[in-house]
Image (tube, coloured by chain):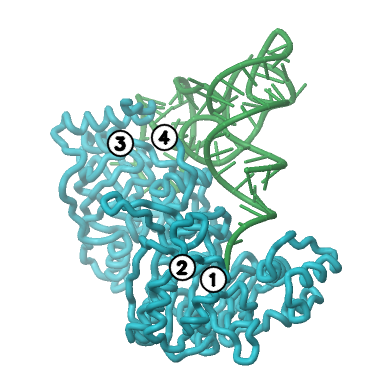
Amino acid sequence: MAREFSPLEKIRLEKLEALRQRGIEPYPTRAERTHTSRAAIQAFEAVEAQGGEAEVQVTLAGRLRAMRPMGKITFAHIEDGEGRVQLFFRANDIGLENLQFFNRDFDLGDFIQARGRMFRTRSGEVTLWVDDFRMLAKAITPLPAAKDEVVDGEVVSHATLSDPETRFRQRYADLAVNPEVRAIFRKRAAIVRALRDFMDEHDFLEVETPILQPIYGGAAAQPFITHHNQLKQDLYLRISFELYLKRLLVGNLEKVYEIGRDFRNEGVSFKHNPEFTQLEFYWAYADYEQVMALTEEMLAFVADRVLGRRTFSYQGHEINLDPPWKRIELRQGLLDATGIDIQQHPTAESLAAAMQAKGMEPKPGAPRGKLIDALLSTYLEPNLIQPTFLYNYPRDISPLAKSIPGDPQTVERFEGFIGGMELCNAFTELNDPLDQEARFLEMGRDYDADDEERHPMDEDYLRAMRYGMPPNGGFGMGVDRLTMLLTDQHSIREVILFPHLRSRGD
RNA sequence: GGGCGCGUAGCUCAAUGGCAGAGCAGUGGCCUUUUAAGCCAUUGGUUGAAGGUUCGAGUCCUUCCGCGCUCACCA
């Protein structure tokens, strides 16, 4: 099917043809630039501040974002990676014919290059006085461009692209016209950089482990399934890094971390995307208390680096990342929030009865761990605004965590919450291969690999553990959620460049 | 997957069941320090798609597509 151009696009295609008729290549191979917008303005202001007469000659490049032709002069703004700068064209300098050429055949959205000297206009804006200009790349489709107005020094945009569907499907257009969106992703990059620096500075080794896995594990999520043609083998996209990273501890890599993508074939929501970025680390000879302390240190470090301070606003709440975080034992937290002591209810039946007695509606047939998880999600999580660790979780929802000595039903596990949202999950890792095998069996893994209904036993992981795994603490954190917090975004889609959307036949 | 809501020009939005509109963008013209520049003129629509009710549907009904919120799901 041939591309259908809109009427607006057809006009621009005519201009493209007009350029070619003049012998001008609308997509030249090379560009020139001596200064960014900001550098040019700063260079001029520096000369100005010294009272100097020296001319600041520059060649700038960027995207045309505003044009104001006024007879025999034209003002325009171009935008580059650092900001905007005004251009001033005058028929006296470039010739009337060239000015009209610019006004007629150049459009908003085109990339251009302009040479000249910097000056300050009567109304005070540092501007490029253009003596030569050139097309760098013609835009055929008009940007959904807003018009900006400066009111009391604040930029007010009118008719900005705001439809979420268009913004996410055409993120390039969103980024091109919404500078605050670009700022979010710059901040995200700074967050990831800070996390990496923190781990490196603490002597953790960055590693990469398989995304395509014959047996998935490390979390209780549904996987995506794919297929290797030549090997005639189904493979899963990983749902966590955990089991591979802990194999590395068996290999005497004492401190390892990975930052990468996980894939979970589950519901999409404002805090769930099917693929998301996680940081996991495993730390030999540490326990969950040490991991808790390192978590506090890490987030304070990231905040210092990225924000320059440890407080920030999230959805109307002032959050403070100064250590130490609040610590609440899960049992006590649930007791305070619901009046139910989970310790008094060692079975699902007993706990469900207690919940019913409180007027709750526990899901029929749910195991005890699920009921506790539901209580946590409903009665605790939404209220955990300031950084808080919930710790000591029931064993039956934590098959990879080690029990508390003397309390086999409770494991050394914590989750960190900020802004009413789960951010991280960590525990003292189970390193007893026989106990691990028993837990896998309890969780429904099976040695009978022929039965497709059952999740196969990860025998290789157990073999690794049998070689001996040092005691260790492990940690996982959603990098997207951390970015949501530090950029004050309610939706995970706002911090993922190309969030998952249902495909559409265009 | 369930419930609720939304989908109108390139963008942002109007339109009691009764002629589909505005601002910006676009096009033509005037304008030599403007900055949402201004002034004059003007183009632009399968109202997400398909059916139905009605003399008449952007509006009401059904189905479908997509998006949002929410619930469920989610160690």
- At label 3, which amino acid type do we have? Asn
Residue A158: x and y, percent? 52, 46
- Under circle 3, the secondary element is helix
- Label 2 is found on which chain of the structure? A
- 3D distance between C-alphas at marks 2 and 3: 70 Å
- The disc, 1 or 2, on the residue closer to the chain's N-terminal end is 1
- Label annotation for residue A103: 3
Q: What is the letter of the green chain? A: B
Q: Is residue A396 above or below residue B55?
A: below
- In the picture, which quadrant includes the N terminus of chain A? top left
- The disc, 4 or 2, on the residue closer to the chain's N-terminal end is 2
Labels 4 and 3 positioned on one and the same chain: yes
Q: Give the residue at mark 1.
A: A441
Q: Nearer the viewer, residue B39 or A149?
A: A149
Q: Give the residue at mark 2.
A: A457
Labels 4 and 2 positioned on one and the same chain: yes
- In the picture, which quadrant includes the C terminus of chain A? top left
- 3D distance between C-alphas at marks 4 and 1: 47 Å
Q: What is the letter of the cyan chain? A: A
- Under circle 1, the secondary element is helix
Which residue does the image show at 47% across and 80% down from the upper left? A474
The answer to whether residue A67 is visible is yes
- The disc, 4 or 1, on the residue closer to the chain's N-terminal end is 1
Q: Is residue A97 above or below residue A458?
A: above
Instruction: Tell me if mark 2 has few (under 14), some (14-19) or many (20+) residues whose alpha carbon lies within 10 angstroms of its own.
Output: many
- At label 1, which amino acid type do we have? Leu
Q: Give the residue at mark 4.
A: A506
- 3D distance between C-alphas at marks 1 and 2: 8 Å
Q: Nearer the viewer, residue B16 or A23?
A: B16
